Image (tube, helix red, strand yellow):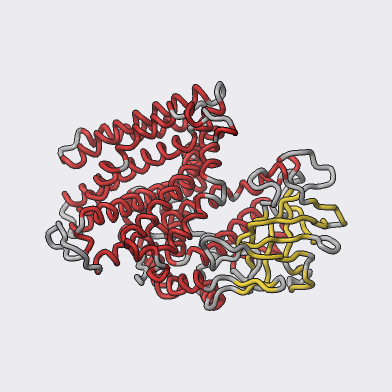
């Protein structure tokens, strides 16, 4: 069983060369976050992830969370790890200083969060959901709610959840039936919710549930949804915990993966109604939830990065020690010397590095959108983030499934045996394409809300930016960069074809547009991933030319980018063809013929 080692050099390289670390640290309010401090933070996080969280990952998978009579016990070791996680200040690191957080840039917290997700994805979900709830309350909660709840939540003493899904509704939030009845300065909430991550557990003193429900005068559909804060234990005026609220965990799901993370079914109001407090304006609950959606979807995309990195490390360790058959590559006496095994390892490595670059690039743009001194720059960055978020979430998690599957394949038959550990990463990765909006939902968001809303202007600006870099690389004196430049130039042209088709068909033929939406998202992700890989190759080449002493690492960066270009970016025309010519066959059969 391999152990997790955070890829600090890869992380820092991506942060600097595509995330814009130096520029992020220079933004107003981040001047104290120096590159040296960032490196020290990452080194400490790497130690914690490797020494504390990774050893518990297997325990969480095999033992899992346990439900009995409404109570949930975390897997052995999780509660102690969570306590030390909070005591060491990791829990509130991305949160605002006003509520006890450290207020670090999103780019920095993103790199640290990747380590939590690689080392123990089930554990990391508790912090992720809590900080999402913190963000919603900080933006939309009353000053009193913020005062009473946020310091405890940022510190990790209380955790948070998002209660959206109901059994009859699934992803269709317009079909929600949960209701809230006014009563003085609060409401009584009634309803059932499912798929609530860390909805019940024994690791914190209190759990703060954010619940979507309808007021008595609510209009139908999503415009009639309000957001309510329902704590597990009511909070007295002096901040102490009071009586148990009228809410309960009725069961936890028996899942394919992330067994260490309890996924709860919650019942609100089985007696007199759960006491809840309105967050934001009436009937604006969905808008309040969407406040935290960009960060939530970035973080789920980051789970794709993290689980891919862990699956690759596991497969690489096995391939470098497993001896079987005669190898064909000089210097390799293990199965890593078999060209097909080497191909799979390079595929895993190249795709993971492209995904990390995309996540870090988006995180850096989030920092610019929040803090850049120039309003125009903030607007441009915000527009780019909105465009990229569904790609980060959809493309990175989509890739993670295939990367984790390749990790099993590298192990051969032993990968199908649970004791080797490779199968867990595949099982854990499977949920990432589903929650926070399935890949299809992300693709429809990309096409319908991000592309069609501005007539493709934001995408056109991104394509122009990518193609300008491609043209510069074509003129390079370095043969590898020239090859990458030609491939990227061709790929941006295919993306333009896909954009044009989508814009022409989205309104006129919505079913055809929707049928091509996921291939279009994959096309966009592949091209943007190729562009950022090219940028890393160019930076590595420049550092090599300047006489860097880290030549092996930099040469590997160029080779990895070339592999992405020659094995994955070349698939852009096929994805384009799926977009522009695949809808007819997708929609050809009626229900009886399926």
Q: Quadrant of residue 538?
A: top left
Where does the image place residue 230, in percent across and percent down from the top left? 74, 60
In the image, residue 83 sits, relative to residue 106, either above or below, namely below
Q: Is residue 256 left or right of residue 424?
A: right
Quadrant for the C terminus, please.
top right
Q: Is residue 414 left or right of residue 188?
A: left
- The correct choice, above or below, for 510 with respect to 259 in the image is above
Q: Is residue 306 left or right of residue 490?
A: right
Q: Residue 146's image quarter?
A: bottom right
The front one of 382 and 97 is 382
Looking at the image, which residue is at 42% across and 63% down? 423
State the residue lying farthest toward the front. 592
- Quadrant location of the N terminus in the rendered image: bottom left
Q: Position of residue 319 (x, y in %)?
A: 26, 64
Q: Could you tell me which residue is drawn at 74 percent across and 45 percent down? A: 225
On screen, 447 above or below 51?
A: above
Question: Is there any visible trace of residue 108 in the rendered image?
Answer: yes
Image x and y of residue 57, in percent: 46, 70
């Amino acid at each position: 069983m391999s152990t997790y080692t955070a890829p600090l050099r890869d992380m820092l390289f991506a942060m600097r060369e595509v995330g814009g670390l130096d520029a992020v640290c220079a933004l107003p309010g981040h001047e104290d976050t120096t590159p040296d401090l960032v490196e020290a933070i990452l080194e400490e996080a790497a130690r914690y992830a490797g020494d504390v969280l990774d050893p518990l990952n297997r325990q969480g998978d095999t033992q899992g969370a346990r439900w009995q009579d409404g109570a949930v016990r975390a897997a052995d070791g999780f509660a102690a790890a969570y306590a030390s996680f909070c005591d060491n200040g990791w829990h509130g690191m991305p949160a605002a200083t006003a509520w006890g957080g450290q207020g670090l840039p999103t780019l920095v917290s993103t790199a640290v969060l990747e380590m939590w997700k690689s080392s123990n994805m089930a554990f990391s979900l508790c912090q992720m959901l809590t900080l999402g709830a913190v963000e919603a309350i900080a933006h939309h909660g009353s000053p009193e709610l913020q005062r009473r709840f946020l310091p405890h939540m940022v510190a990790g003493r209380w955790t948070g959840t998002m209660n959206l899904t109901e059994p009859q509704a699934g992803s269709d939030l317009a079909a929600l039936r949960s209701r809230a009845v006014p009563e003085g300065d609060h409401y009584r909430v009634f309803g059932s919710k499912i798929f609530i991550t860390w909805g019940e557990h024994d690791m914190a003193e209190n759990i703060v549930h954010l619940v979507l429900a309808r007021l008595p005068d609510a209009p139908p559909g999503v415009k009639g949804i309000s957001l309510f804060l329902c704590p597990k234990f009511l909070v007295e005026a002096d901040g102490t915990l009071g009586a148990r609220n009228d809410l309960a965990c009725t069961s936890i799901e028996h899942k394919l993966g992330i067994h260490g993370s309890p996924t709860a079914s919650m019942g609100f109001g089985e007696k007199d109604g759960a006491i809840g407090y309105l967050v934001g304006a009436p009937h604006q609950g969905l808008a309040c939830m969407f406040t935290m959606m960009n960060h939530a979807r970035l973080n789920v995309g980051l789970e794709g990065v993290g689980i891919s990195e862990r699956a690759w490390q596991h497969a690489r360790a096995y391939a470098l020690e497993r001896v079987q058959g005669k190898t064909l590559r000089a210097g390799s006496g293990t199965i890593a010397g078999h060209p097909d095994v080497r191909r799979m390892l390079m595929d895993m490595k190249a795709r993971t590095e492209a995904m990390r670059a995309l996540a870090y690039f988006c995180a850096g743009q989030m920092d610019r959108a929040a803090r850049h001194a120039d309003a125009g720059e903030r607007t441009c960055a915000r527009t780019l983030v909105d465009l990229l978020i569904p790609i980060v979430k959809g493309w990175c998690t989509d890739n993670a499934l295939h990367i984790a599957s390749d990790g099993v394949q590298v192990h051969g038959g032993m990968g199908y045996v649970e004791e080797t550990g490779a199968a867990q990463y595949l099982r854990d990765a499977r949920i990432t394409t589903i929650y926070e909006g399935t890949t299809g939902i992300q693709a429809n968001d990309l096409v319908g809300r991000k592309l069609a809303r501005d007539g493709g202007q934001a995408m056109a600006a991104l394509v122009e930016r990518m193609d300008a870099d491609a043209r510069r690389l074509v003129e390079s004196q370095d043969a590898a960069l020239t090859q990458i430049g030609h491939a990227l130039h061709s790929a941006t042209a295919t993306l333009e074809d896909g954009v044009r088709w989508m814009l022409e068909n989205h309104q006129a033929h919505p079913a055809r547009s929707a049928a091509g939406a996921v291939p279009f998202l994959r096309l966009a992700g592949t091209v943007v991933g190729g562009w950022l890989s090219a940028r890393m190759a160019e930076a590595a080449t420049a550092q090599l030319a300047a006489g860097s002493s880290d030549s092996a690492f930099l040469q590997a960066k160029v080779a990895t980018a070339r592999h992405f270009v020659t094995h994955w970016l070349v698939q852009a025309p096929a994805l384009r063809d799926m977009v522009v010519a695949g809808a007819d066959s997708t929609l050809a059969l009626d229900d009886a013929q399926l």
